[in-house]
Amino acid sequence: MIRMYGSRISYYAGKVETYLRYRGIDYELLSMIDHAHEIVAGAGAVQSPVLRLEDGRWMSDSTPILAWFEAQRDRPSIYPADPAMRFVALLLEDHADEWLWRPAMHYRWSFLQDRQHASGVLADELLSGVRQPRFLKRWGVTRRQFNGFVRRDGVTAATHDHVERTAMTAFDRLEAILVERPFLLGDRPTIADFGFVGPMLRHFGQDPTPAELMRQRAPRVYTWVARMWEAASGNDAGELVSAIDPPLSALLHETCKTHLVQLRENALAHDQGQRHFAQEVEGCRYQGLPVSRYRVWCLEELRRHWRELDESAQATVRVHLSEPDAAVLWEPEPIAQSDYDPERRAPFNRAINVFGTGVPS
Ligand SMILES: N[C@@H](CCC(=O)N[C@@H](CS)C(=O)NCC(=O)O)C(=O)O
């Protein structure tokens, strides 16, 4: 059986768990803190999730993990066969993985009920081996997560409304698609669905404050979360859409205006050797954001996928990508180089955390 080190309320572990359930692959969930030494030795970085295969190999990072599992099996795949739609799905996965992280952490750690719930789960689940009173563990977890992933990730009085609005826009954009079909790109889940399940399952669909907002504002997203969790192996015969329709186009527009702006500013700052950067997203100015080398790699990967498209597929997608923000995908010269995973061994490479040694400092 596969060992998954992580937490049962983790964004990316939720994404991988949903996938493993979909493919009928058994796994057991273990604490990543209790096994931190072996994880660092085997995988390179402690993060949730890290997987260990039965043959002893270690795997990190949900994006290449899912890609590797899919490569082991015959079609139909969760990556659309149509190259243009495949690119769309990969871009949406990255948007969900990286852009919605900030609002997900804000809703979990800025509100009393939410942080009481999450800190209790994490104290019991991950810190059971730590000899400290429970209230102290909860206090320590809350302080680490709020200071690191909310305050030091740019959530301030000036950005607070935009952070919340971006989550509500995600609800609205997904809801509009799910009026049309059961999954984001058709009658079965694709990598776009597994990407969005990250923030939507363990955070927005489960933390008390955003879960209530989701139920009120986006009931179809709420049932889609359950449908993703329930989706059994073998239910993968459905058709996928062959073209980008208006609700999908609106979601791609949102990706360009938010996620691609952040990827660009992060890469520029990385190239200049900065540790922090500022960005303006939809008229809202964020300051003091932590530079992420991992996200420079995410941009490199998206650019690689873009280059793999022929001209006709590029033209098909490009109509739905707003410029100038989307140009970061096809400008001839890369803004920065991550030098991460140059041999393309992911998910079996030495992993790095999204931020520094785990939490922005
Ligand atoms: N790119 C990784 C990100 C994994 C990740 O950052 N997980 C979070 C928790 S959901 C984490 O472990 N953060 C590091 C920390 O809190 O120290 C993936 O897709 O699996």
Image (cartoon, helix red, strand yellow):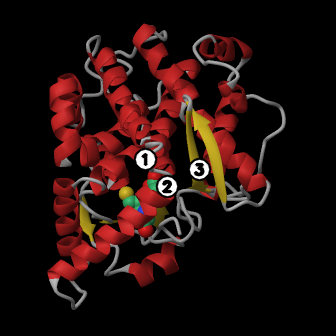
Residue placed under numbered mark 1 in the picture: 157
- Left/right placement of residue 138 relative to residue 294 reads left
Which label was assigned to residue 297? none
Which label was assigned to residue 153? 2
State whether residue 253 is above or below residue 16: above
Q: Name the spot of residue 63 as percent of width and height, x first.
A: 48, 47
Residue at x 17% of width, y 62% of height: 116
Q: For the residue marked with disc 2, what is the amino acid?
A: Asp
State whether residue 285 is above or below residue 149: above
Q: What secondary structure is marked by label 3? A: strand
N-terminal of the two: label 3 or label 1?
Answer: 1
Quadrant assignment for the N terminus:
bottom left
Residue placed under numbered mark 3 in the picture: 287
Q: What secondary structure is marked by label 2? A: helix
Q: What secondary structure is marked by label 1? A: loop
Q: Name the spot of residue 88 as percent of width and height, x first.
A: 52, 24
Q: Nearer the viewer, mark 1 or mark 2?
A: 1
Q: Nearer the viewer, mark 3 or mark 2?
A: 3
- Residue at the outermost bottom position: 131
Q: Nearer the viewer, mark 3 or mark 1?
A: 1
Q: CA distance from mark 3 to mark 1?
A: 12 Å
Please tell me which residue lies in front, 22 or 264.
264
Residue at x 65% of width, y 52% of height: 277
Say which quarter of the image contains residue 247.
top left
